[in-house]
Image: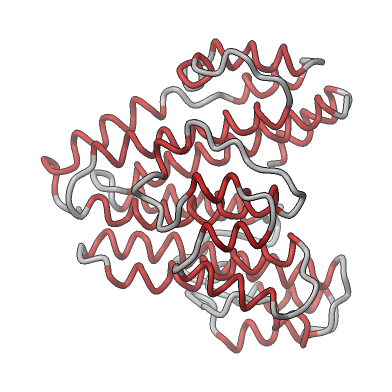
Amino acid sequence: MSGGLLEYSGLVTKTKAMSGRLLEEEDYLRLSEYETVDAFISFLREAEGYAPIFASHEEIAHRGQVEAVIRNSLYGDYKKLYQFARGEQRAGLELIFFRYEVNVLKTCLEYAMTGSHYELGYLKLIFDGHACYDAGMAAQAESFGELLAAVAGTDYERFLHRMSENGQMSYADYAFGLDVYYYKNAWKRKQKIRDKNVKQMMEILLGTEIDWQNIMWIYRSKRFYQMKPADIYVNLIPVTYRLKKDQLRQMIEAETVEGFTEHLAQTVYFKGKDAVASLGEELTEQKIMEKTYRLVCRKYPMSLAPVLKFLYDKEHEIDLLTSILEGIRYQLPAREIKELVLTM
């Protein structure tokens, strides 16, 4: 086990305490019954995992502010764990922060392209001195040009500038490009982690996520968009982990969804002693990643693994809360919201 019992016992214990504040399925189902955003907020103000951050946001005027507060709780929990960690324990966490850094930049970009700015608020305490760009300046950007100025001198500036040279680009184009940028560079960065077991953990988790991002992209391209292989290749993350390049090629070039599925069934994710799925079950990246995190935690119980799993679970919790909030906003029937929650 990475670092041994003494090195990780404190961090794992703290993580377990924080995991105990995560919401349960019954909480989501109860939230799904609410008919107003105010009732939704009132519930979270009383929830152990959200009460502290809502306490500092007494006045919340609109849904966007609610989503920001919920999202900020993830970054707040990350900061607590990072400050508690020491030495090489922080190496894996810094790779997780890279994802947050990209996600916040995407949010700032989305606001800037609509001529408004993002209320960074509590996030400023977390991102100042940690992000490679001025998060406060990025949040205040109200145009693409102002956002580029906020990330001046960084790889983000060079990347976004190159993308802008391709002509009229939508936010979706930039967001997708930044996601691919993250995966390519995170895969390289994990090579610099000195602790062998932490490095192996990050390779398993990140590699599996990349493989399944590509698998689901190929599936959606065939199932919903009937895209040609050449167009699918363009948007593929150029990294492979357990998938072989020939297997990717076969899935991409399959003429039908059924043909794609036949090739997918031959991959290591479905065959052999390390298989994590079967074609008889409903497959999503979320389900595969949950299984992968559980496997890593069993293999490395006293390590960074439980910390990484908690942060993953927290992020999924926020996705669920955001979906419920959207359902309430659009006044969907409680039954439909519950069905959505149970399938996520």
- Return the x and y of residue 201 as percentages of the image width and height: 34, 59
* Most foreground residue, 343 or 147: 147
Question: Quick one: quadrant of the C terminus?
Answer: top right
Residue sitting at 56 percent across and 69 percent down? 211
In this image, 165 relative to 196: left or right? Answer: right
Residue sitting at 53 percent across and 59 percent down? 276
- Return the x and y of residue 333 as percentages of the image width and height: 88, 24
**Total numbered badges shown on the rendered structure:** 0
Q: Tell me, what colour scheme is on the image? A: secondary structure
In this image, 138 relative to 301: left or right? Answer: right
* Most foreground residue, 93 or 277: 93
* Most distant residue in the left direction: 6
State the image quarter where residue 245 is shown: bottom right
In this image, 45 relative to 36: left or right? Answer: left
264 is higher (above) or lower (below) than 311: below
- Return the x and y of residue 203 as percentages of the image width and height: 38, 66
233 is higher (above) or lower (below) than 87: below
* Most foreground residue, 177 or 43: 177
Residue sitting at 42 percent across and 33 percent down? 76
210 is higher (above) or lower (below) than 106: below
Residue sitting at 28 percent across and 51 percent down? 300
- Return the x and y of residue 258 as percentages of the image width and height: 81, 73
63 is higher (above) or lower (below) than 104: above
